[in-house]
Image (cartoon, rainbow, N blue to C red):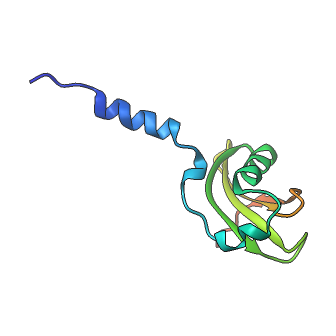
Amino acid sequence: MKMTKRPTCALAFLAVALPSTAFAWTGEKYAPQANFTMEQATAIALKERPGTVTDRELEREHGGSGLRYSFDIKGTDGVVYEVGVDAKTGKPLEDSKEGSHPD
């Protein structure tokens, strides 16, 4: 029987081809109130803190317009940071190390 590498190649392709926005996020019900999409806010957050997004949500929270995207980003240094982006203005609101008890 001849073995092929198709399953491995297919998995590798999917890992690269699927954008980070493919996984679900909390707070989608607030999306109609936001002036920026999750994809746009993700780009802003990654510009502020390069790395890998490990979690994201859209939430009502004090500060800024009161509606913000919140991202957990594993930085290039291996540390997880919380980065906030105002959902109405697109301005970064927060860029801090995630504490020992994340939200």
**Looking at the picture, does residue 11 appear above or below residue 25?**
above
Give the residue drawn at x 70%, y 63%: 98
Give the percent coordinates (x, y) of residue 71.
Answer: 70, 59
Q: Is residue 103 visible?
A: no
Toward the top, the furthest residue is: 2
**Quadrant assignment, res 1:** top left
Give the percent coordinates (x, y) of residue 27.
Answer: 66, 71
User: Is 45 situated left or right of 78 in this image?
Assistant: right
Toward the left, the furthest residue is: 1
**Quadrant assignment, res 83:** bottom right
User: Is 97 situated left or right of 14 in this image?
Assistant: right
- Give whichever of 53, 13 is nearer the camera: 13
Toward the front, the furthest residue is: 32
User: Is 101 situated left or right of 9 in this image?
Assistant: right
Give the residue drawn at x 62%, y 69%: 26
**Looking at the picture, does residue 43 appear above or below residue 66?**
above
Report the number of numbered marks.
Answer: 0
Q: Is residue 46 visible?
A: yes
